[in-house]
Amino acid sequence: MILDIARLLLFPALMAFAAASDLFTMTISNRVSVALAASFLALALMSGMPLSDLLAHLGAGVAVLVVAFGCFAMGWVGGGDAKIAAGAALWFGFGHLLEYLVYASLFGGALTLLLLQFRQWPLPYQFAGQPWLIKLHAKESGIPYGIALAIGALTVYPETEWIKAVDLAHFAFG
């Protein structure tokens, strides 16, 4: 039952925290990326994931990390975004990686367009005292892409083996 609760809550909670952190501070702590990697490894080992699958998941994480850091070096994404994307790829492996990247890209494009439009309008007086909103509204600020990465991840996660392995009989009330 503990394993099922971990499968249901760990990854979604970490991704939601990353999104909220990026929204309010425009940064994602390295601790979130480390927690994603450590919890993946712990859950994979406790679940008895075969070594070949474990290596494939690690390969997906490393591949995304390399590409994402190339994007970071070009100034296209933040470092936290690169690490969170790699952490999510670790959980998805190659089996759900393309689906995740497509969703994250689509949500990222929508988020970017919404923020660019939002930044064209004056910030309502009622919100002018909120430092995080002032920073989000500033035209020179970046896009908190961690939000799109999290929404993409949370869209794909229910289709993964992590959730399919949950024994819902543990949670039956009656």
Image (spheres, rainbow, N blue to C red):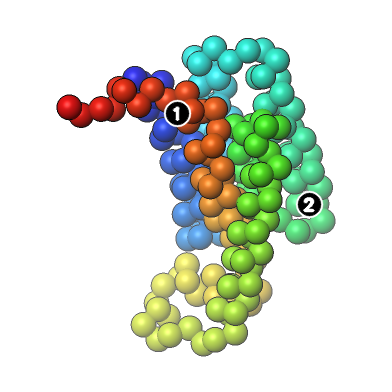
Mark 1 secondary-structure assignment = helix
Q: Is residue 14 visible?
A: no
Tell me the quarter of the image containing the N terminus: top left
Mark 2 or 1, closer to the camera: 1
Point out the tag, 2 or 1, that comes first from the N-terminus: 1
Q: Tell me whether the residue at label 2 lies in contact with that at label 1, contact meaning CB atoms closer than 8 angstroms.
A: no
Lateral position of residue 106 relative to residue 164, left or right = right
Q: Is residue 168 visible?
A: yes
Q: Position of residue 78 (x, y in %)?
A: 68, 54
Mark 2 secondary-structure assignment = helix
Q: Position of residue 41 (x, y in %)?
A: 57, 22
The image quadrant that residue 26 belongs to is bottom right
Mark 1 residue crowding within 10 angstroms, few (<14) / some (14–19) / many (20+): many
What kind of residue is marked 1? Answer: Arg
Please name the residue shown 47% across and 54% down the image.
20
Please name the residue shown 25% across and 27% down the image.
172
Q: Position of residue 98 (x, y in %)?
A: 71, 42
* Circle number at residue 71: 2
Tell me the quarter of the image containing the C terminus: top left
Please name the residue shown 71% across and 20% down the image.
55
Q: CA distance from mark 2 to mark 1?
A: 30 Å
Lateral position of residue 25 relative to residue 75, left or right = left
What kind of residue is marked 2? Answer: Cys
- Residue 150 drawn above or below residue 34: below
Residue under numbered circle 1: 7
Lateral position of residue 169 relative to residue 103, left or right = left
- Residue 10 drawn above or below residue 49: below
Mark 2 residue crowding within 10 angstroms, few (<14) / some (14–19) / many (20+): some
Please name the residue shown 55% across and 33% down the image.
160
